[in-house]
Image (cartoon, grey):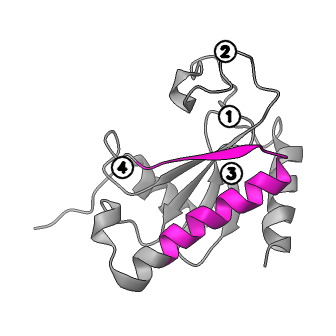
Amino acid sequence: MNATPDTVIHRRVAMLRAGGDAGLVARLASGWVVMGDPQVIRGYCLLLPDPVVPQLNALAGPARTAFLADMAHVGDVLMKAMDATRINYAIFGNVDPALHAHVFPRRADEPAGLVTAQPWAFDWQAAPKFSAVQHGDLLGTLRRAFAASG
């Protein structure tokens, strides 16, 4: 008997399908754009594939192309909406063995010691947890930016 994997990614995609995730930013062809938790870098988002797969290599042909194109699209939208100087992308899947892409808009006004650091050098414990109340304006900005991006 094959049990459905139970990862944070599987549970979050199930919540998104049910309309119960306050961090939903946009639905794209390959999956869902959601706010990262915590907001270690303002505007940090994740792209979650739907259906969930274990890793990028589990996608083939058009599905892989769509996910990677959507990941770049998330970066394009964040670049403009967050006035970013560059975008950092990361796909690991070591903790939660389910494909998900981290997309970080980087800005020139970051603390001097962190401007060139990778996102895991930031203090994730001190970063604010995503809150629809606290981050409502940002969430609205990103939702409008994705809606306008076509």
On-image quarter of the N terminus:
bottom left
At x 85%, y 46%, the residue is 83
In the displayed structure, 52 sits above or below 99; it is: below
Would you name the residue on which mark 2 appears? 113
The disc, 1 or 2, on the residue closer to the chain's N-terminal end is 1
Neighbor class of circle 2 (other Cα within 10 Å; few <14, some 14-19, many 20+) is few
Neighbor class of circle 4 (other Cα within 10 Å; few <14, some 14-19, many 20+) is some
Q: Secondary structure at mark 3?
A: loop
The disc, 1 or 4, on the residue closer to the chain's N-terminal end is 4
Amino acid tagged 1: Gln
Residue 68 in the image, given as x and y percentages of width and height? 50, 68
Predominant secondary structure, magenta span: helix
Q: Nearer the viewer, mark 2 or mark 3?
A: 2
Would you name the residue on which mark 4 appears? 7
- Asked if the residues shown at circle 4 and circle 3 are in contact, with their CB atoms under 8 angstroms apart, the answer is no
- Mark seen at residue 21: none
Amino acid tagged 4: Thr
Amino acid tagged 2: Gly
The disc, 4 or 3, on the residue closer to the chain's N-terminal end is 4
Is 55 situated left or right of 13 in this image?
left
